[in-house]
Amino acid sequence: MVKRKRRAFTDEFKARTVRLVGESGKSIGVVARELDLTESAVRAWVRQSAIDGGRGWPGASRPRSGRNSSACGERCARCGRSAKS
């Protein structure tokens, strides 16, 4: 199997690809082949689009907590404990 050269895609191209998957009724694999993309890349773009649109699994769009991110008195999103000052 020949390894592909890593390519970069604009956010606009990714958004159009995700829209194509949603509006065309074609599977992710078919769209990926038509655009000469890997299926895993298109699947990741579709998944991320759902998360960004608030349709992902619970907690998926929450930013990851840093060690002292809860110092203002909020509970840590990861473990539920108050952060130590």
Image: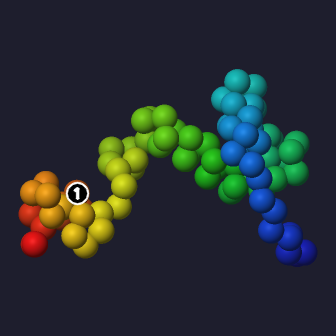
Q: Nearer the viewer, residue 84 or 23?
A: 84
The residue at which mark 1 appears reads as 77
Q: Residue at x 80, y 68 (%)?
A: 6
Element carrying mark 1? loop
Asked where in the image residue 4 lies, by quadrant, the reply is: bottom right
**Residue 6 against residue 53 in the figure, above or below:** below
Colouring convention used in this rendered image of the protein: rainbow
Q: Residue at x 70, y 55 (%)?
A: 41
**Residue kind at label 1, given as amino acid type:** Ala
- Give the side of residue 32 with respect to residue 51, left or right: right
Q: Quadrant of the C terminus?
A: bottom left
Image x and y of residue 29, in percent:
75, 46
Q: Residue at x 74, y 35 (%)?
A: 16
Asked where in the image residue 71 lies, by quadrant, the reply is: bottom left
Local packing at callout 1 (Cα closer than 10 Å; few below 14, some 14-19, many 20+) is some
- Give the side of residue 37 with respect to residue 11, left or right: right
Image x and y of residue 67, in percent:
25, 73
Image x and y of residue 58, in percent:
33, 44
Image x and y of residue 78, in percent:
24, 62
Residue 80 appearing in the image: no
Q: Quadrant of the N terminus?
A: bottom right
